[in-house]
Image (cartoon, rainbow, N blue to C red):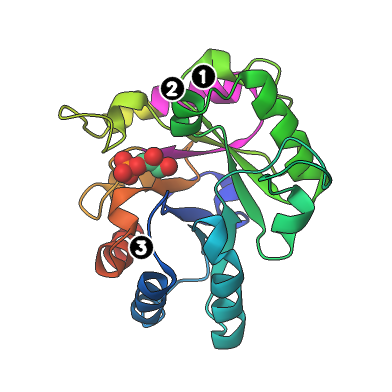
Amino acid sequence: MKTNPLYHMKKTIIAANWKSNKTKNEAKIWLNETALGNFPEHFEIVIFPSFTLLDYISGFVRINDTPFKIGAQDISPFDSGPYTGEISGKLIKEFADYVLIGHSERRAGFGESDEMIRKKVDMALRAGLTPIVCVSNISQLDGLESKEGLVIAYEPLGAISTSGPNAQPENPSLTSEFVQKIKEKISAEVIYGGSVEAGNVGQYISLENISGVLVGGQSLDPINFINIIKNAI
Ligand code: 13P
C-alpha cells in the first residue's frame, strides 16, 4: 500500500488510448462488455476514443451511469473560429473532461513542437479540460508551467508496443527514477505509458510517485482492459 498521504485523496488514473481505432459499432461492443466490470471508486477510468466517438460514448456513459470519464486525443491550438478541420477546447468540453496533448505519435507524425504543445495546454486549461501531456524526455518539459490539474504521461519511445519489434515495457525502477526527475522539474501528477498489460500493471501502480497508467494496445480489447483494472487494485 502506498504511504503517500495524497494517495487517499487523489484517484489512480487508468486511461485507455484507443488511438485511430474503433468504429461506432466496435465501440458499442466494447462498452457493453466493460460496463459489466467492477470499478472501485478510487480509480479514475478515462477513455480516449477518436473525436468521431466522443458524442456517442459520452451519451452511453450518461445514460448507463457508467463510471468512466472521457477524453479527446488532441485539441486545437486555436479558439473556435476559422480553422478548418480543427477541434477547439470548447467543442471538446461538450463531451469530455480530459485531453491528451503531445503524444509521441503526434510529435513524430504531425510535427508537433513543444511550443505548439504549450499552446494546446493553455487552450485545454482555458476550456476547463484536464491536459495529459505526453513526454518521453525531460527537455520536453521546458517551458511547461506547473498548473493545478496538469498531468504528465511519461511514455518512453521504445516502450510503446507499436514502436517496433524490440518494444518492451520499461523496467519499473527506471520508470520511478525518471518520474522523480520529472517531479523535480514540474509539480504535476505523473502516469506511465508503454506496453502496459494485465501482467505488469501492478508493478507500475505500486510505485510511490506514479498516479496511474496510460494504456494503448491492451485497452482495445474489453477483457484485457478489465483485467488491467482488476490487477491494478
Ligand atoms: P501501448 O500500450 O500500446 O504500448 O501504447 C502506449 C501509448 O502510446 C498510450 O498512449
Q: Can you tell which of label 3 and label 1 is closer to the viewer? A: 3
Pick the residue in front: 179 or 196: 196
| Pointer 3 or 1: first along the chain | 1
Q: Tell me what residue is drawn at x 74 percent, y 25 percent.
A: 145
Number of the label disc, if any, that sits on residue 229: 3
* Mark 2 surroundings within 10 Å by alpha-carbon count, few (fewer than 14), some (14 through 19), many (20 or more): some
Question: Is residue 86 left or right of 218 when viewed as pictured?
Answer: right
CB of mark 3 within 8 Å of CB of mark 1? no
Q: Residue at x 45, y 24 (%)?
A: 108
Q: Which residues are magenta?
A: 176-193
Say if mark 2 contacts mark 1, CB within 8 Å. Answer: yes
Q: Secondary structure at mark 2?
A: helix
Q: Is residue 206 visible?
A: no
* Residue 63 magenta: no
SS at badge 1: helix
**Residue 230 x/y as whole percent:** 31, 66
Q: Which residue is mark 2?
A: 178
Are the two marked residues, 2 and 3, in contact with CB atoms closer than 8 angstroms?
Answer: no
> N-terminal of the two: label 2 or label 3?
2
